[in-house]
């Protein structure tokens, strides 16, 4: 506990630390991805983070970001295409808008799959997925998963009946490109 408390620092919400660590609301926990924590139950460091960004005016549009240093898969997103294609083929609204490798600064292996399908709200919507470092997952190259949903509420408690997704497919792709093409790890983040 003392090890953690010595590395805990206050941080302004717009302050970006220059050293490796974990940022959270008004705080920063310093430490590199490969550093061990004395007395920890695990002999290695394991980190994951999950965040959801919901459009305030269009509650059926949201982006989910997930990172995990402890996941490494045998196959990439595109190599698992059989399961995705099977899902899309059984859905009247299922279609691939775009798929393929993606070039992102500072990330060696990234792929995306953009599809339309029938959402939980029973409307045609969009489900886009970007997966990076799936075969490299480690503390320095964590698995990164970014998804966008259009036509589905992020919280089932606030779900209401909708007739169509808030964004058109083209608008959803535009939002997706604006977000994912600017995603990059901060230098020295790991």
Image (cartoon, rainbow, N blue to C red):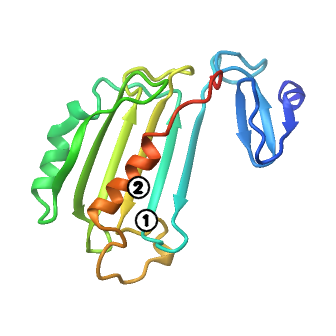
Quarter holding the C terminus is: top right
The residue closer to the viewer here, 10 or 182, is 182
Q: Is residue 51 above or below residue 162?
A: above
C-beta proximity under 8 Å, tags 1 and 2: yes
Residue 154's spot in the image, x, y percent? 46, 65
Q: Residues within 10 Å of mark 2 (few under 14, many from 20)?
A: some
Identify which residue, 114 or 179, lies in the foreground: 179
> In the image, residue 108 lies at what x, y percent?
41, 21
- Name the one closer to the observer, 33 or 56: 56
**Residue bearing mark 2:** 175
Q: Position of residue 157 (x, y in %)?
A: 50, 75
- Residue 118, compared with residue 190, is above or below; it is below
Helix, strand or loop at disc 1?
strand
For the point 16% across and 59% down, the residue is: 94
Residue at (46, 35) in percent of width and height? 144
Mark 1 to mark 2: distance in Å?
Answer: 10 Å
Determine whether, in the image, residue 35 is placed left or right of residue 79: right
Upstream in sequence: badge 1 or badge 2: 1
- Please tell me which residue lies in front, 187 or 83: 187
Q: Is residue 112 left or right of residue 132?
A: left
Image x and y of residue 167, in percent: 35, 68
**Res. 12 image quadrant:** top right
> Mark number for residue 78?
none
Which residue corresponds to mark 1?
61
Mark closer to the observer (1, 2) = 2
Residue found 50% across the figure and 42% down from its top: 66
């Amino acid at each position: 506990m003392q090890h953690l408390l010595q590395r805990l620092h206050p941080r302004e919400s717009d302050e970006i630390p220059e050293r490796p660590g974990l940022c959270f609301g008004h705080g920063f926990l310093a430490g590199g991805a490969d550093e061990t924590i004395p007395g920890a139950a695990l002999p290695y460091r394991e980190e994951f983070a999950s965040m959801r960004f919901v459009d305030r005016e269009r509650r059926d549009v949201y982006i989910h970001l997930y990172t995990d240093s402890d996941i490494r898969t045998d196959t990439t997103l595109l190599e698992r295409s059989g399961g995705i294609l099977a899902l899309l083929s059984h859905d009247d609204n299922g279609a691939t808008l775009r798929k393929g490798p993606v070039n992102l600064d500072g990330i060696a292996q990234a792929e995306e799959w953009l599809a339309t399908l029938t959402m939980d709200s029973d409307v045609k919507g969009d489900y886009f997925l970007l997966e990076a470092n799936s075969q490299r997952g480690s503390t320095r190259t964590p698995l990164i998963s970014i998804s966008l949903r259009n036509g589905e509420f992020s919280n089932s408690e606030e779900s209401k009946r909708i007739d169509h997704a808030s964004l058109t497919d083209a608008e959803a792709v535009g939002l997706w490109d604006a977000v994912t093409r600017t995603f990059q790890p901060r230098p020295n983040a790991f």
